[in-house]
C-alpha cells in the first residue's frame, strides 16, 4: 500500500490504482505529496500539464490560475475550497479526490471523470461550457455530489452513476441521454428539465413531475417509477 498523506477523503491508494493512472496518462513520474504552490515553484513557467500524474497533492483553499491539464490523472488530491480560475481540464481523471466547495471561475471541462471523490457544493454554472459538446463532458462514478448545481446547463450524456446526489439542482438543465443509474437523488430538484433518454435504472428517491419535465424515452426501474404517479394525483391501493 502507498500512503497518501495529503488527502482527507481517501487515506490509502493501492499501488495498482496508481499504476493504472500512470499507464493511462503515459507519465514516467508522478508529482506526489506536495502542495500545488511547491509544484509551481519547481515549474514557474509551466502553464500546461500534459499526461502527468498528481498524487496526494494539497491545494486546499489555493487558487489555480490559467492552468491547463490534459490527459492527467489526479489521485488522492485535496482541492477543497480551492479556486480554479480560467483553468482547462481535458481528458482528466480525479480519483479519491476532495473537491468540495471548489470555485470554478470560468474554467472549462471536457471529458473529465470523477471516481470515488467528494464533489460537494460545487456550482457548475460558474464554469464555461461550449454551445455544442461532443460526448459526456462530466462523468461521476461512486462519488458524492450533494448540494451541487447544474441549473440551466446543457450537459447532454452526462454520467452520474452509483453516486449520492442529495439536494442537487437540475432545474432548467438539459441532460438528455445521460446515465443516472443507481444514484440516490434524495431532495434533488427537477423542474423544466430535459430528461429525454436518461437512464434512471436502479436510481432512487427522485421526485419528478411528469408535467413539468421532459421524460420521453427515459428508463426507470419499475418499482421506483411508481413515484412518477404522485404528480398525477393518483392514490395507489393494494
Image (cartoon, helix red, strand yellow):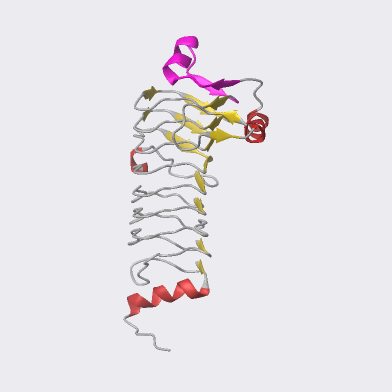
Residue located 41% across and 50% down the image: 154
Give left or right: position of 101 versus 26: left
Q: State which region is magenta.
A: 30-51
Give left or right: position of 235 versus 197: left
- Residue 179 coordinates in the image, percent (x, y): 52, 56
Residue located 44% across and 62% down the image: 195
Residue located 68% across and 30% down the image: 23
Q: In this view, does 177 lie above or below 80?
A: below
- Residue 210 coordinates in the image, percent (x, y): 38, 71
Q: In this view, does 129 lie above or below 45?
A: below
Res 131 seen here: yes
- Residue 237 coordinates in the image, percent (x, y): 39, 88
Give left or right: position of 64 versus 112: left
Residue located 67% across and 31% down the image: 19
Q: Hey, which quadrant is residue 175 in on the image?
A: bottom left
Q: Quadrant of the C terminus?
A: bottom left
Q: Hey, which quadrant is residue 92 in on the image?
A: top right
Amino acid at each position: 500500500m502507498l500512503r497518501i498523506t495529503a488527502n482527507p477523503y481517501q487515506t490509502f491508494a493501492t499501488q495498482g490504482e496508481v499504476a493504472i493512472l500512470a499507464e493511462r496518462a503515459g507519465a514516467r513520474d508522478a508529482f506526489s505529496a506536495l502542495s500545488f504552490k511547491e509544484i509551481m515553484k519547481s515549474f514557474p513557467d509551466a502553464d500546461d500539464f500534459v499526461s502527468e500524474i498528481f498524487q496526494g497533492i494539497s491545494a486546499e483553499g489555493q487558487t489555480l490560475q490559467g492552468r491547463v491539464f490534459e490527459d492527467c490523472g489526479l489521485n488522492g488530491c485535496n482541492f477543497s475550497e480551492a479556486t480554479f480560475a480560467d483553468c482547462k481540464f481535458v481528458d482528466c481523471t480525479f480519483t479519491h479526490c476532495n473537491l468540495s466547495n471548489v470555485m470554478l471561475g470560468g474554467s472549462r471541462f471536457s471529458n473529465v471523470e470523477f471516481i470515488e471523490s467528494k464533489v460537494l457544493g460545487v456550482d457548475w454554472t460558474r464554469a464555461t461550457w461550449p454551445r455544442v459538446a461532443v460526448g459526456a463532458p462530466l462523468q461521476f462514478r461512486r462519488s458524492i455530489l450533494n448540494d451541487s448545481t447544474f441549473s440551466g446547463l446543457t450537459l447532454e450524456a452526462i454520467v452520474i452513476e452509483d453516486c449520492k446526489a442529495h439536494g442537487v439542482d437540475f432545474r432548467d438543465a438539459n441532460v438528455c441521454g445521460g446515465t443516472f443509474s443507481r444514484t440516490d437523488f434524495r431532495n434533488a430538484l427537477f423542474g423544466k428539465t430535459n430528461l429525454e433518454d436518461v437512464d434512471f435504472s436502479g436510481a432512487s428517491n427522485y421526485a419528478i413531475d411528469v408535467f413539468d419535465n421532459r421524460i420521453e424515452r427515459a428508463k426507470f426501474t419499475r418499482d421506483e417509477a411508481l413515484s412518477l404517479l404522485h404528480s398525477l394525483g393518483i392514490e395507489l391501493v393494494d
